[in-house]
Image (cartoon, grey):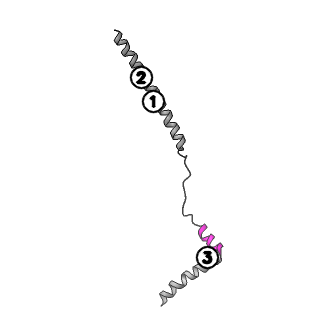
Amino acid sequence: IAKFGLYVTIPIVLMYTFANNSKNLQKFMGNKSYIVYPPEGPRPPSPEELREMAREMARKRNSGMSMDSQRAGSALIGQELL
């Protein structure tokens, strides 16, 4: 019977202590910071910025390939003339 009495009275006493006086609850909760987040890092680029970066990379790659193909084509033309 003593155990049952404790199981019933402890939650009632705690509820009375914290529910009726919110300063007690704030004092109890304020002493402990449960979650401490690290500082926020730089945000990743937005989808539009990623698309634009991909377009730029494709343009550079295509312009580089076209330069190489033009050089290769002119070299072939020079060899055909010989």
Which region of the structure is painted magenta?
Answer: 21-30
Q: Which percent across, then down, holds residue 80?
A: 34, 12
Instruction: Rate crowding at label 3 as few (under 14), some (14 to 19) or many (20 or more) other CA atoms within 10 Å.
Output: some
Asked which secondary structure carries label 2, the reply is: helix
Asked which secondary structure carries label 1, the reply is: helix
Asked which secondary structure carries label 3, the reply is: helix
Quarter-of-image position of residue 72? top left
Instruction: Rate crowding at label 1 as few (under 14), some (14 to 19) or many (20 or more) other CA atoms within 10 Å.
Output: few
Q: CA distance from mark 1 to mark 2?
A: 11 Å
Q: Which residue is mark 1?
A: 61
Q: Which residue is mark 2?
A: 68
- First in sequence: mark 3 or mark 2? 3
Q: CA distance from mark 3 to mark 1?
A: 67 Å
Residue 18 numbered tag: 3
The one nearer the camera, 8 or 63, is: 63
SS majority, magenta? helix
Q: Is the residue 39 above or below the residue 78 in the image?
A: below
Q: Which percent across, then down, holds residue 47?
A: 52, 44
Residue kind at label 3, given as amino acid type: Phe
Membership of 28 in magenta stretch: yes
